[in-house]
Amino acid sequence: MTDAAIRQKRPATHRRTPAGGAPTAAHRPDEVQSADEAHDPRIHVDAVTDLLLGTWGHTRREAREMIKDPAFWRIDGQPMDEHRERVLGQLRLLVEHGGSRRAFPKKYGGHEDNGANLAGFMELVLADPSLQIKSGVQWGLFGSAIHQLGTEKHHDAWLADVIDLRMPGAFAMTEMGHGSDVAAIGTTATYDPETEEFVIHTPFRAATKEFLGNAARHGRAATVFAQLITDGVNYGVHCFFVPIRDADGAMLPGIRSEDDGVKGGLNGIDNGRLAFEHVRIPRFNLLNRYGDVAADGTYSSDIPSPGRRFFTMLGALVQGRVSLDGATTTATALALDIAVTYANQRRQFDSGAGTDEVVLLDYGMHQRRLLPRLAQVYAQFFAGDELLRKYDDVFSGREDTPENREDLETLAAALKPLSTWNALDTVQECREACGGAGFMAENRLVGLHQDLDVYVTFEGDNTVLLQLVGKRLLSDFARQFTGADAAKLAGFAAKQTAGKVFHGAGLRRLGQAVADLGSTARSVELGLRAEHQHELLAGRVEQMVSDIAGRLRPAAKASPAEAAAIFNANQAELIEAARAHGELLQWEAFSDGIAGVEDAGTKHVLTWLRDLFGLSLVEKHLAWYLINGRLSTQRAASVSRYIDRLCLRLRPHAQDLVDAFELAPEHVRAPIALGGEQERQDEARAYYAALAAAGEAPVSEKSLKKK
Amino acid sequence: MTDAAIRQKRPATHRRTPAGGAPTAAHRPDEVQSADEAHDPRIHVDAVTDLLLGTWGHTRREAREMIKDPAFWRIDGQPMDEHRERVLGQLRLLVEHGGSRRAFPKKYGGHEDNGANLAGFMELVLADPSLQIKSGVQWGLFGSAIHQLGTEKHHDAWLADVIDLRMPGAFAMTEMGHGSDVAAIGTTATYDPETEEFVIHTPFRAATKEFLGNAARHGRAATVFAQLITDGVNYGVHCFFVPIRDADGAMLPGIRSEDDGVKGGLNGIDNGRLAFEHVRIPRFNLLNRYGDVAADGTYSSDIPSPGRRFFTMLGALVQGRVSLDGATTTATALALDIAVTYANQRRQFDSGAGTDEVVLLDYGMHQRRLLPRLAQVYAQFFAGDELLRKYDDVFSGREDTPENREDLETLAAALKPLSTWNALDTVQECREACGGAGFMAENRLVGLHQDLDVYVTFEGDNTVLLQLVGKRLLSDFARQFTGADAAKLAGFAAKQTAGKVFHGAGLRRLGQAVADLGSTARSVELGLRAEHQHELLAGRVEQMVSDIAGRLRPAAKASPAEAAAIFNANQAELIEAARAHGELLQWEAFSDGIAGVEDAGTKHVLTWLRDLFGLSLVEKHLAWYLINGRLSTQRAASVSRYIDRLCLRLRPHAQDLVDAFELAPEHVRAPIALGGEQERQDEARAYYAALAAAGEAPVSEKSLKKK
């Protein structure tokens, strides 16, 4: 499809469910819906868009308007070298549009508007994820390192050039040998008081900086993380500004760059390696906000604890995770827009009822594949906006306390894994739900999967991030018992035992089973409404954390090796608890988000969608709820049936719900979601009708035999 | 890594677990293993390789030897056009090596060895999946259509040219408007008795043939599926041989080709569309094995039922599914070889016990990610060999009965979805388990995912295939009650009720719970051994099918629309039952496969692996087992613990188990799995040791503060 063709497309007429949205073959005779339940409420699409785009909706719309220009779009199959140059050019365009300055100080032409900054960046994923990530490298990582870890002298020296892309840069943290474990990197920055210089050095191959955007080709400088050594003491990881290429693009002496070559996606970014051979930089170039070295080599820091100092520095760069959470949510919405729109037009097999072929989304299985994922992405929009507000609160300085920073980091560490993993899962399901057409690059889904793939392991490997969340949950849990409050501890222990007996022996379950006897589907649902969903989701987090804490208790008195082994034995479950915590946060954000909705129809439908999200989570962990006596077998069995009912109820609203993402044809671009499928079907139907009308249709062999 | 470098690599010394395979941080103090349990048994790697490569191991090894030649390898990032030409050249090489003739009649230079043919093709996936699939298009689809659907005159006319690639061809079944529903395609082949020709025509855009390999560029002819119309009657879908390009590659009159362009993967194949504008072909070109048209236009067929005739024709092409099942298993094994080998060398974070950094595979979470998937692929190897033998039995003519054909088709329809979906899941998990390195194209995993992606929807969409299996299960179930055996039906109904009461009300569960009280972990395991695993897996299939059949019963007396709605409401669960059936088949094949193993150590380890496979299935469906009263909550809770134990036991054998895939460096090619990681770590360790020995290591800030 050409650029012009995409912009001419007016998809609205073809994107709605034919025949007013009524399902054609999906009724269930045993659970008939009343018409008012299924059809009457409709959402106000525009109002829902406002809800989804959230606090910085204005900025998001501005960014989306900008990227309607085809110059920003990914070209499928473009060779890597050309793609890299194209994306660099897009960054320049972005600068021209003022898209690079929102976060930076006004002194250098910035707006000091952190929330808007990330909101704007997230939307770039619709144009080309390489553009989003290369922008993130330049302004979110390289620029932010100077901004957040440097001081005013550094800002004065470099920020204006960074903002305007006169100085493209790399963010050199990860090494070949160490990714998630940043504290253990091998690069050294040894202070030489004679010359007042730091010597940056890569002492062995594994200490080579790796996977850095802008390193292979475009970077002029890098913010390099290295072990700061002065006077024979290693003060841990600090960040240094290191020029790497001259104005002509030639490597500076002592610096070696290697190209990572082709990757699974994001091939518009020139990822590569950097190695340093005793490269000298002025003392000035230590980004010294959290730690400094005097001319004579004396080290000083406002944060005496090396551990806390390290995590403060890393925490200053949390925006990458916030940004990835939002970008993947937008990308996931795009995938669902494509798959749901197609599923609302594509027909396959007649139903056996002698009618027309059935629209894909009328199949029970297809609803099950797509609608819970639609609910999931709605939850992500609401949770993402909360995260973004938290981020803005802290980084604007309005609520910048250590507690808020810690909360922000934990929230980002909980949400980024869920939204990035869900992106891969949903994009893949959408691709499969579109069959062979989903495998064509022009229909976007395969490209999205390829580009988003690495989001689950970069900016904090998801598994590692969830462990951080899990440890935070454990320490919050332990905090309840500080001060050796014996009564409280005793109460806790009692509760533990009570919990075990209560849940384990099935007393509660039995009660539920009795109450459920003879119940109608409707009354079972009553036990799965909002407050019960919350109780189930929250109760699971609490119990998992408390169970794990109980199992870890012996570690306190064990040898280090034994303690490590005990922790290792509980690692998988701790990660699962962290995931449960993130899911709870998403559910709560979704519920809070619709609490203020006033339009009855909108509220009705979004509540179904929230219920679908909540119950899908319960269904996913159903075995846990059963084993731990939180659901009777009767009620557990009803969860899946309730989900089926919700899918049926939501099916007529599916197109509205993706239309509320407000993605223009220039954002969607996939021909299968822009009306082509419907046009072809209309043409085919007209052909057969004309044939029949002319008496020229061949008779079927079967009808012949009947004669 | 250069070709020469890969071939020089002698990975053996680096691919084994350091320190003899003992886990360093993965012991669980509460479930200590005796040394003889965990360490003493070892598998005989070579003997296991023989087991895995199966009946046609000789042919597989022959194919693997051939593709050690770099001329067969995928080049990452190669532009689409060059990749397409390269793969065409590889097909010629394959012909030179005799790789294209195994399945065909001896009369045309073939070997008439069907099993060997597919076994050889499957291995090509290691070189480049595009090569495997383009070969499949040429010889498995285009060639097979002529071979299986044509008669001797067609074989004489074309097979030799097909085999030698003098005539590349497309297999034109799918249309833009109809994929899985082949019976509804729009292309027509109308017989003209005046000229004794068929007129092939694309009556509307949706009837354009779509996604055809060899259509965009290389095909000279196509086997075109079209509605056969003669004398005003439509006799349904038949296959026709249609020349499409002349010797110079120009399109023949009336035939239009369009290029599908860039796809998510398999870009070495020139997929495209074909449309026909009243194209005339001689009557001769109807592939007439199952249906023929006489010169005067009279239709005849040995199979009077149009439905049975249609399915017989499609069934003759089952080999594609058999082949995909095997190829994805091989590709999945490659992914696990890479990820397990890397996880056995890569270290990250110290354990807190003050020792060296921990090898990834010693983390509980990492074991949980990789080892159950290793068990899964073992199951697939065994099940795949059974499928291949069944295929060979039928197509060799030795056991070619309608029942065996139906069994073969059902088996292929059950296994292909499981192995292709598992390939995507496992390759993705392996990619993530390798972190950023997993995202680099050179490490193979992203390319495998991209290429294998479409395997889940082509050659029968997985969801559609599982529905076919589900319907077969239902009809087998119904067959028990044919002849209106009242006593049997009554017994069945009683059993149903009994089952409901028994399972639903938790009586059995209660008994189990009592028996479990005070049990040790070991005695709980006794209840999860082989025979119980089988009972659980088989019982689930039986009950699901019987439950669905019960719910579908009202459909028999309902209106067509109601019947369709009832079926639709049970669609998702029917598909789940089919999946359960496939899983049971895999488990049984795995168990049968190790039954004959005589070496005690090998048998010991493979039995753990089989148990891990079985229990992972039980864990996946744990909620079902609980809701249906098949497992007590106590026993259900023990399933996950038992899996943890099995992972620990198998951990020291992980490298052996992937080494048994017998993949040479030329098949693996991923630098991270060929010793590079270990070399870098050794170098880093030596650096720090030398520094310490020379007294030049900086002291840590922390140790400074302690002073």
Image (cartoon, coloured by chain):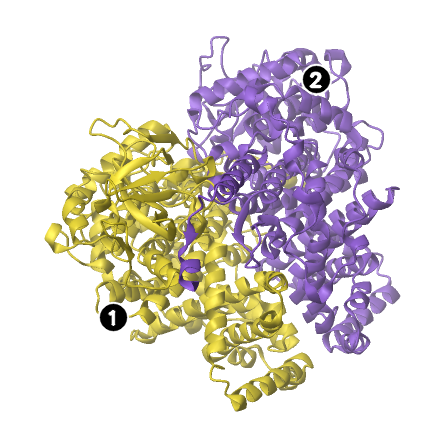
Chain colours: A purple, B yellow
Residue B60, image x and y in percent? Answer: 24, 55
Residue A58 visible in the current orientation: yes
Query: From the viewer's perspective, is the residue at label 2 or at label 1 nearer?
Result: 1
- The three-letter amino acid code for the residue at tag 2 is Arg
Label 1 belongs to which residue?
B399
Q: Position of residue A149 (x, y in %)?
A: 68, 25
Q: Are marks 2 and 1 in contact (CB under 8 Å)?
A: no
Label 1 sits on a secondary structure element that is loop
Nearer-the-camera pick, B28 or B118? B118
Amino acid at the residue labelled 1:
Glu
Q: Residue under label 2, please give it.
A: A101
Is residue B78 in view from this perspective?
A: no
Near-viewer residue (B43 or B113): B113
Q: Is residue B450 left or right of residue B619?
A: left
In the depicted structure, whether residue B701 falls above or below residue A220 = below
Question: Which residue does the image show at 38% across and 60% down from the upper left?
Answer: B306
Q: Quadrant of the C terminus of chain B?
A: top right
Quadrant housing residue B447:
top left
Q: Quadrant of residue A281?
A: top right
Above or below, A74 against A552 in this view is above
Residue B255 picture quarter: top left
All told, the count of numbered labels is: 2
Residue B298 at x, y percent in the picture: 28, 54
Q: Is residue B5 above or below residue A133?
A: below
Whether labels 2 and 1 share one chain: no
Q: Residues within 10 Å of mark 2 (few under 14, many from 20)?
A: many
Q: Secondary structure at mark 2?
A: loop
